[in-house]
Image: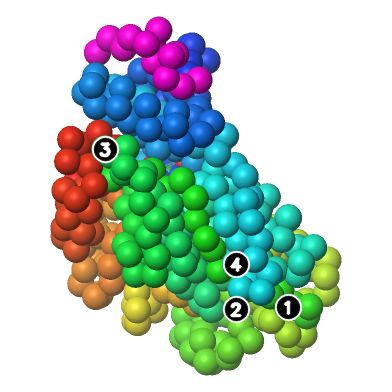
Amino acid sequence: MELNIESLKLVCPCSESPAEKVVYSTDSSCMQGELLAVTWPENLEQLQKLIRFATREKVSLIPRGGGTSLVGGCVPQSSIVVDMSRLNKIKRLILEEKTVIAEAGVYLDNLNNSLSKYNLEFPIKPGSHAGCTIGGMIATNAAGLLSKKFGKVDGWVSEITFMDGTGKLFTFEGNEAKKLAGSEGTCGFIVEAKLKLLEISENFSSDLFEFENLQGMSEKLNALKNDDAAIAIEYINPIASKLVGMTAKEHLLVKYSNDKGKLDIDEASKVWKMRENLYSVIFNAGFTKIEDPFFEEGVERFLDWINKQNVPAYGHIGYGIIHPHFRREEDIERMNNAVKELHGQLAGEHGIGLLKKKYAPLGITTRIKEIKAAYDPSNIMNRGKVI
Ligand SMILES: Cc1cc2nc3c(=O)[nH]c(=O)nc-3n(C[C@H](O)[C@H](O)[C@H](O)COP(=O)(O)OP(=O)(O)OC[C@H]3O[C@@H](n4cnc5c(N)ncnc54)[C@H](O)[C@@H]3O)c2cc1C
């Protein structure tokens, strides 16, 4: 498809240079797409003009935050990528409400760094916290390292300002705002949000537990789940443990909101750094395909199945999300069958995007179709994703 770049330049800052094509044709999923142009709207007027341009030209717009999607959520398919990074103001901190109003392109770490002087934070913390944005986190309804205690993004958003696929601007509150969490850019742009904040505890501490077998791990896990001070419980299986230089055993890494953890500050910082590096270490070992099934209960039976496959796995076990890594697509099909048999759910936190379309659960596709029909009748937004 040919794009009239000169007309696009009148609407919004943009580029179709070969260098931008390399960067914006993919995201953290490593899937490759075809980019017509990338745009950087600097205000809502430009965003609205861009939507009108796309409607006229019948071309799809792909919202992009930090581009850390692991499912090809930002990969263009002969479309225009809309990089939201210039909408990056932290507009208002309302101390008496413990809320903040931030634009979609604000990076999570930047938000939390600027809140730290008020002893406040946004407590949903994906492993990608340095590179993901508020807009992307809402659009994927992200979970993360602290989800055992704080759940997912939808519990922490009280208001969303949203421009739909026709260019209309809305402010949604409460449950209406929650509905947009997990919409994966398929119906419009999240342009800003009012986020609930949490006071930072003074007294964090951590522990690392090692187990000979899953049974021992499971007993400790159940005790920790009932411990209100355990705000993060992360699991690492023997193969993943070995790949990051630990003994090839079952491990639980725990963060407490009090001082009961036994690791000193240096040890704690070392093990959490190791946890954050797990994805890249395992990816570089050739297990490039990451999955994210979710188990409300019975996760141990799935871990037993995973260990028998001889693949690395880790995850936010306190919340029920596990990240097995595979080398081959056919292994993922087998895993999906195992997840179904063991009463788990697919797509616990990364979304569906392009990569997981053929496995998308019916509940998710039905919901996205409903939102899309209401807000993007011309199918301009993130065409070809999820449904
Ligand atoms: C190393 C690593 C660790 C990760 N750990 C976690 C984890 O612990 N928990 C977790 O949930 N995820 C995790 N992820 C996945 C990813 O980081 C999250 O999905 C994150 O929320 C995406 O944010 P982003 O700003 O990068 O969004 P992007 O990747 O830019 O976009 C993701 C989706 O949101 C849409 N979107 C982006 N911005 C907007 C907007 N303003 N309006 C409408 N739609 C928009 C995009 O179109 C796309 O469909 C991880 C990824 C990596 C690479």
Q: Earlier in the sequence, mark 2 or mark 4?
A: 4
Residue depicted at 66% across the width and 74% down the height? 96
* Label annotation for residue 99: 4
**Is 231 or 245 nearer to us in this picture?**
231
Give the residue pinned by disc 2.
231
Crowding at label 1, few (<14), some or many (≥20) Cα neighbours within 10 Å?
few
Give the residues in magenta: 1-13
Q: Position of residue 85 (x, y in %)?
A: 55, 36
Tag 2 near tag 4, CB within 8 Å: no
Count of marks, rendered view: 4
Q: Residue at x 52, y 60 (%)?
A: 194
- The numbered mark, 4 or 1, whose residue comes first in the sequence reads 4
| CA gap, disc 3 and disc 2 | 41 Å
Among numbered discs 4 and 3, the one appearing first in the sequence: 4
- Which of the two discs, 3 and 2, sits closer to the camera? 3
Q: Amino acid at mark 2?
A: Ile
